[in-house]
Image: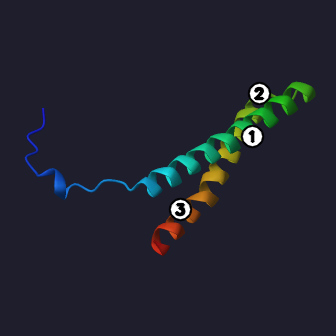
């Protein structure tokens, strides 16, 4: 159990706009990654390429997506 006795007013609460923005980003991320997985799955089922290549491309694609979108998140935070 935590003995946090700080008043509630000193805690920062996320604004509704920030929650909507975070929710929107999460939905876009889920959609992009889902489409990437679907594309790779259909590609590899139709070509019979090795399973290790599927996982390598899956991780590489997700890693590149995070690499590029992480910069967008930081730049939007500094504008606010």
Camera-near label (3 vs 1) is: 3
Q: Which residue occupies 85% across, 30% down?
A: 42
Regarding mark 3 in the picture, which secondary structure is present there?
A: helix
According to the image, label 3 marks what residue? 73
Camera-near label (2 vs 1) is: 1
- Residue contact between numbered discs 2 and 1, judged by CB atoms under 8 Å: no
N-terminal of the pair, mark 3 or mark 1, is 1
Regarding mark 2 in the picture, which secondary structure is present there?
A: helix
Q: Residue furthest right?
A: 47
Q: Which residue occupies 80% across, 30% down?
A: 41
- Residue contact between numbered discs 2 and 3, judged by CB atoms under 8 Å: no
CA distance for labels 2 and 1: 16 Å
Q: Residue furthest bottom?
A: 79
User: Looking at the picture, how far across and down is residue 10, in whole percent?
Assistant: 18, 58
CA distance for labels 3 and 1: 21 Å
Task: Report the disc number at residue 36.
Answer: 1
The 10 Å Cα crowd at callout 2, few under 14, some 14 to 19, many 20 or more, is few
Q: Indicate whether 2 appears above or below 22.
A: above
According to the image, label 2 marks what residue? 51
User: In this view of the protein, which residue sits in the foreground, 74 or 5?
Assistant: 5
Q: Indicate whether 13 appears above or below 27.
A: below
N-terminal of the pair, mark 2 or mark 1, is 1
**Left or right, residue 43 beside residue 11:** right
Camera-near label (2 vs 3) is: 3
């Amino acid at each position: 159990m935590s003995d946090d006795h700080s008043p509630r007013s000193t805690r920062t609460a996320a604004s509704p706009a920030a929650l909507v923005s975070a929710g929107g980003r999460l939905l876009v991320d889920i959609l992009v990654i889902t489409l990437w997985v679907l594309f790779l799955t259909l590609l590899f089922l139709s070509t019979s390429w090795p399973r290790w290549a599927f996982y390598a491309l899956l991780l590489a694609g997700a890693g590149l997506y995070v690499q590029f979108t992480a910069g967008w998140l930081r730049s939007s935070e500094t504008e606010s």
